Amino acid sequence: MTTIGEMGEDALIHLFATRLPNTDAALLGPGDDAAVLSVDGDLVVSSDVLIEGRHFRREWSTAADVGWRAAMQNIVDIDAMGAVPTALQVTLAAPPDTDVKWVLGFADGLREACEPHGVGVVGGDLSGASEIAISVTALGETHGVNPVTRADATPGDSVAVSGPLGAAAAGLALLAAGVGDGLEAIGLFLRPRPLIGAGLEAALRGATAMMDVSDGLLRDAGRIARASQCGIAIDSAAVPVHPAATQAARVLGVAALPWALTGGEDHSLLATFPPGAFLPDGWTLVGVVASDFPGVRVDGAIPDALGWDHFAS
Amino acid sequence: MTTIGEMGEDALIHLFATRLPNTDAALLGPGDDAAVLSVDGDLVVSSDVLIEGRHFRREWSTAADVGWRAAMQNIVDIDAMGAVPTALQVTLAAPPDTDVKWVLGFADGLREACEPHGVGVVGGDLSGASEIAISVTALGETHGVNPVTRADATPGDSVAVSGPLGAAAAGLALLAAGVGDGLEAIGLFLRPRPLIGAGLEAALRGATAMMDVSDGLLRDAGRIARASQCGIAIDSAAVPVHPAATQAARVLGVAALPWALTGGEDHSLLATFPPGAFLPDGWTLVGVVASDFPGVRVDGAIPDALGWDHFAS
């Protein structure tokens, strides 16, 4: 094994960069002080962090899984605005004794997640650290379509999600319990597979507010409610539970619905649509925007658990 | 003291965001899945990482110093392309027992560095971690000016730097030795003050290759030489040593020139200009682009120390 400390920065950057995906939007890619991109319309930009031991564990996720997730959770943030993702900036800080193979596997995962969507990795930084810390900034362009924020949900709007929920949380529960080897939920926890492009379609269908479900349906619905100064009523019976979550629940002898309500990291989209709007294919109506209470109610009641906090230990 | 773990993510993000600088380019700022920016011309984007204990120490740098440096070293990367910086994305991972005051001080430093240049912080992410890990992505726009890369230096070109060198390395040496309290070099290590806008001016004057000196003049000149497939001959007597470095050298009883040649983090610009071009005000001629050797020569010889490696321990 060769460690990144032994290999040195310039050689590692060279090896790393050759594995990264390209994008047609790049006028100048990695290797200079900065990359240069063409932007059609306005620029949409979002960033997320992944910290070893908090957002992933090396005994559960391969390096490529970590790269995949780092890319996907940021790409979906661009989609969640109704914009088209074009490029990522990726910074990776890792202990000097990290195997070079891990870093290259991470690049492979970035590429596998990005390439089907025409997204490139155009730059970033590599550094030493005591633990692996990854930061990804995703860039996208609006092509003249108005971005959909969290702030314009209106009482009476329909509340819908773009796909079934709970698979990632179920996969995490299986891994934590050390059971269910090979079950679909584990794969969906390690490599979330939101349908990229669903956000743009929702924007074109008139979505009034939108975000991706990264911290759980209830917590994230609460964010739309707060930003839009309204309430959101969720009908738990309508929430689409992912079949992989149902399968995992059977294995663990627990209920699957709590994962769908409060589990994060599926990265399906949550959006509001004007009353009577046709939902795009694949979306499910789960509730309604209300004016008579703040925050989120589930089946008419204030829920007792909302999701997770990134600083909780 | 209140820790960020006690305060929780949403409350901390709210407090943090209110201290961040704004930019006229932002159509939508922090708080949604993504920010939205207008871009005049093409987009220029660069990222850097700062890790506690490697890039800064909390016993030397205040939180605001760290924020300042995180912003400035990325803003200068945009300037080094000849582009105009407009916005930053900032991710901060920190131990849950970090004082909320530290995080807010960090935001203050970002603001102090950004505001004079009209640069805003438009988004980012906050997370827990075992050590403080900061990642900044800087965004800028070309306004139709062709970006200046590292790859187009041509034999016969003049090699010049935009300001005196060695102050940051001298300041680091003073801090490491525990002497020189209050000397200017320490302040310039903690808060580098490159002249933002120098890169755009150089681009308009026809600079053929350009980068900022972040890892030392010789190492970074070597990067231009490699990218441009040429050699760079540096005349050490011509290299402008920062007066603060000269002062620090006197205190420590050492020579200042090595800091100017191999010390990083001053973030002055290094550029090549066509033979006979008038250098912009403040620039100093330090050498010439050569065709008869690869890499960097100092006073005709291969130097024995080039700079520093980010993975070296």
Image (cartoon, coloured by chain):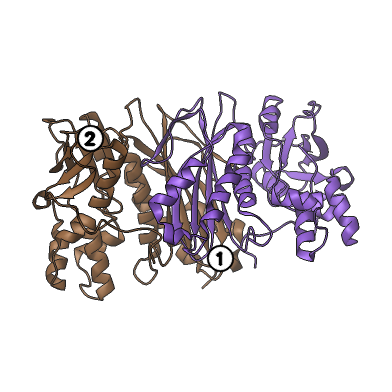
Chain colours: A purple, B brown
Report whether mark 2 lies on the same chain as mark 1: yes
- The answer to whether residue B51 is left or right of residue B61 is right
Q: Residue at x 87, y 42 (%)?
A: A238
Which amino acid does the dot numbered 2 rest on? Ala
> On screen, B111 above or below A212?
below
- First in sequence: mark 2 vs mark 1: 1
The reply to whether discs 2 and 1 touch (Cβ–Cβ < 8 Å) is: no
In this orientation, does residue A135 appear? yes
Tally of numbered discs: 2
Question: SS at mark 2?
Answer: helix
- The answer to whether residue A35 is left or right of residue A281 is left
Label 1 environment density (alpha carbons within 10 Å; few <14, some 14–19, many ≥20): many
Q: Which mark is residue B4?
A: 1
Q: CA distance from mark 2 to mark 1?
A: 43 Å
Task: Please identify the quarter of the rendering in which residue B145 is found.
Answer: top left
Q: Which mark is residue A248?
A: none
Q: Residue at x 22, y 29 (%)?
A: B206
Task: Please identify the quarter of the rendering in which residue A306 is found.
Answer: bottom right
Residue lying at the far bottom in this picture: please name it: B178
Camera-nearest residue between B90 and A305:
B90
Kindly identify which residue carries mark 2: B202
Q: Residue at x 27, y 61 (%)?
A: B189
Camera-nearest residue between B3 and B228:
B228
